[in-house]
Every structure is written in structure tokens, then in C-alpha cells.
Image (cartoon, helix red, strand yellow):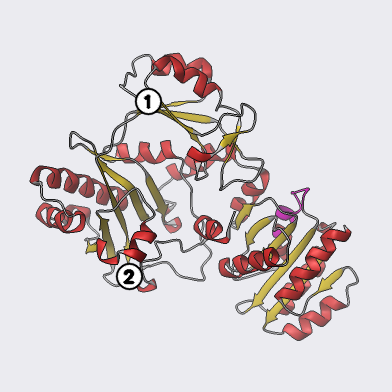
Amino acid sequence: MTSRHIWRLCCRTSRPSFLSNSMWSVGGAQQKRFIDLQEYQSKKIMSENGLTVQRFRVIQSLNELDKELQDFNCDEYVIKAQVLAGGRGKGSFKRSGMKGGVKLTKDKHNIKDLVRNMLDDHLVTAQTTADGVIVRKVMVAEALDIAKEFYAAILLDRASGGPVLVLSQFGGVNIEEVAEKNPEAIKKFPLPVDSQKVETSYLQNAVRKGLDLHDDKVTMSVAKEIQNLHKLFINIDAMQVEINPLGLTPSNKVVCFDAKIQFDENAMFRQSWIKSIEEENIENEDSRMILAKKYNLNFVAMDGDIGCFVNGAGLAMATMDIIHHHGGKPANFLDVGGGVTQEGVEKAFRIITQDPAVKAILVNIFGGIVNCDTVANGLIAARHLVNVPLIVRLEGTNQQSAMKLLESVPDIITAKDLDDAAVKAIQAVAKF
């Protein structure tokens, strides 16, 4: 897993990079908790809010399959493993050996074998560890042909003080690549905070310009979906809703094929149903992920043997890159945020040390918001929780006094800079 993958998974202020910071309303340093949705959950939310999605069923066991599919008849079916990881179609299952977590079939009788090979097996993709992620649910959906793919998103716009509609005639691909190669293909249209006040004619005009549509009937159908998307955005207190692709079938039916939804955690008291989604998804996560959510920390497990304890997503990625550069392998991405306390140090250690593959921990902290002395005292107090070499690099406020404090502790290895820390961590692993 590359730093780019980690950034997409973990950055607290995640947004399409073609949008400037001035267009995003999230505070940069504030620690935030985002909720990941499985595909069937996104589709259920969209359907409940008037958006058009494929017909689908969710299967949790082979015993319920026949009953669930009894009256579910399609010309073609798509069977998808439901996990919180990208790259499902190119993944593979550890037990059954089946390649691909997304399958197509026109024969209804084939569905049971495909579901059997997915359920309760571990799916390994480019965004999981070598152990993969266990599949507890499988979605069986109506497969639809797509004649044209579009991109549509609604997100908060600081400049206009409200939501903005983002459209592109090029969907079904990485929108950031479109922005880089063809920026004029991305159009933005301000929307009112009150979804009842947006005029249909305004949406139709936006759709014509943003998606380069000339068929009035199709334009009206897409505008209706955008109108419902706007209502969804407001109703669930979203910060971003991205539909990619927004598809047009050969019969000109408009369908939302996939969605990414980001919620405002400050509105959780109004959106109590989100808690049930978190509880529903928690069974698919390992104990480290569960602890990270409980402690409100950013964590992604990886396949290496050097645990990373860092404050800041950018610093975390730089740390992993340096480890790779010197021939080592990071075991995780762990961003503890701007304020590091003794309690925060203990929480981070409890998460990292649950991985038996970890043979050393590299602590890389920039003391800007936090005082380096505070971090040093926290590391010393929590050192007993760690039974592997601990390598520490501190930079910033009170750096020198903090490093002297750490150097007085025999079993803490200090480093003068990040390169030195990475080399010492790799050497510690070799001796472990």
C-alpha cells in the first residue's frame, strides 16, 4: 500500500484535490472522525432519499439466499463482496482461492456458488493487508449496462458559504486525473443551504453545462437526481456526497451506481442512525481498528514490522516513505493528531502493540501545537506498555530539553532527524 493510498484512506480533510482549500469548510488541525459506508449501505441511504439505484439484495448466510432471491429476477446479476476496501474486483479470496470480489452472471443458479466462495472468507485487495478483510455480507444486484458515465458531487464551499455542485461529463474514472489533464471539464455551481429553494430551471441549466447534455428529457431526469442528491446532502448533514459514476443506461435511465458519503461529526446528535451503521460495520474490523475508532485516531494496518506513531497525516506519509527509502517496511499508519498527551501516547501504544509483527516502534512528533517535553514525559510514562525497541525523533518546541530527558532513559533510542530514526528502526528490527 503506497502513501497515496494511505492519504486517500486517512486524510482528515479528505476532498478532491482539484478543489482549493478556500472551497473547503473543514478546519485543518481539528481532529475529526469520518464514517466509512459499505456499498449496500450507501445505496440504501440513496434509495431512501429518492435517488435511483440498482435493485439489490444483501445476503448474510447461504440459508437465507433462496428466500432473498425468490422474487428477485434480473437479466443479469452482479455479485459483490461487501468490505470497506477498494479494489474488490481485482482482489482474491484466501480460503476459496477465487479471483475477484465482483462477479457477473446471467444464470441465477450460479449465484449460490459465488456467494459461498465469498461469505466468511478473507478478501485480499490492494488496499488491505496480506491477511485481507473478512466478508460478512454479499450484495446481489441487478447488473445494468451503462451507455454514458458522469461525475456528480455536492460539498461545502467556504467561498460561497454553502453547498456547491460539482459536475463532469467524464465519470467512472479518477476525477483527480480528469482535473489534472482536462480541468475545464469540471464545472461548479453554487447551491442554497435550503434544498427547497433551488429552482428546477437552475439545476437543468447546470446539468446542460456541466455534463454537456443536449437531450431535454435526459437533462430533466439528471436534474431530478441532482435535486434529490441535494436533499440527501442536507437531510443527513453531509459534508460531501460524491456519485461516481452517475450512469445513463442505453434506455436513458439515470442511475447512481456508486457513492462516497462524508458526514459532519458535529451533527451526530441529529443523525443517531449513523451509530447503528458503525456497529454494523465493526464486526468486519480487527481489534486495532476498533480501538482507533474508540480513541478517535487515524489508523490503517500494513504488512511491515516497524510501527509508526506520528502526529499529522503528511508527517505520517513522509515517515513511511523514509522507512521504505532505507529498506524497511512500516507496519501501520497511525496519526494521533495535533495534541499529544500521555493518555494519547498510551492509546497509540495499545493499538500498535496488538500487532505481533511489530518489532520496533518509530515515534516521529513535531512539537508545534504540543510541547516536546509533554511528549517525552508521556513516552517515558507509557514505555512499560512496549516490549520492542522504541526509536524517537522530536522536532519543535522544547526539543532539546525533551531529547535530553529521553536520552536519560536506557531503553529509549533517540534520533537526530528522520533519516537517522528510520535507519535506527531498521537496525533495531534486524537485531530483534
Relative placement, left or right, of 415 versus 264 is: right
| Residue occupied by mark 1 | 77
**Residue 150 seen in the figure:** yes
The answer to whether the residue labelled 1 contacts the one labelled 2, judged by CB atoms less than 8 Å apart, is: no
| Residue occupied by mark 2 | 158
Asked if the magenta segment contains residue 300, the reply would be: no
**Residue 374 seen in the figure:** no
Say which quarter of the image contains residue 184. bottom left
Q: Relative to the observer, which residue lies in front, 59 or 293?
A: 59
Q: Relative to the observer, which residue lies in front, 232 or 215?
A: 215
- Residue sitting at 51 percent across and 30 percent down? 137
Residue 10's spot in the image, x, y percent? 54, 58
User: Secondary structure under badge 2?
Assistant: loop
Q: Earlier in the sequence, mark 1 or mark 2?
A: 1
Amino acid at pointer 2:
Arg
User: Secondary structure under badge 1?
Assistant: strand
Relative placement, left or right, of 385 versus 332 is: right
Q: Few, some or many C-alpha atoms within 10 Å of disc 1 (few <14, some 14-19, many ≥20)?
A: many
- Residue sitting at 64 percent across and 46 percent down? 129
Relative placement, left or right, of 71 versus 187 is: right
In this rendering, is residue 20 above or below 304? below
In this rendering, is residue 12 above or below 392? above
- Residue sitting at 31 percent across and 37 percent down? 48
Quarter of the C terminus within the rendering? bottom right
Q: Residue furthest right?
A: 410
- Depth check, mark 1 against mark 2: the one in front is 1
Residue 347's spot in the image, x, y percent? 70, 58
Residue 287 - label: none
Residue 382's spot in the image, x, y percent? 79, 63
Q: Give the extent of the magenta segment.
A: 348-357
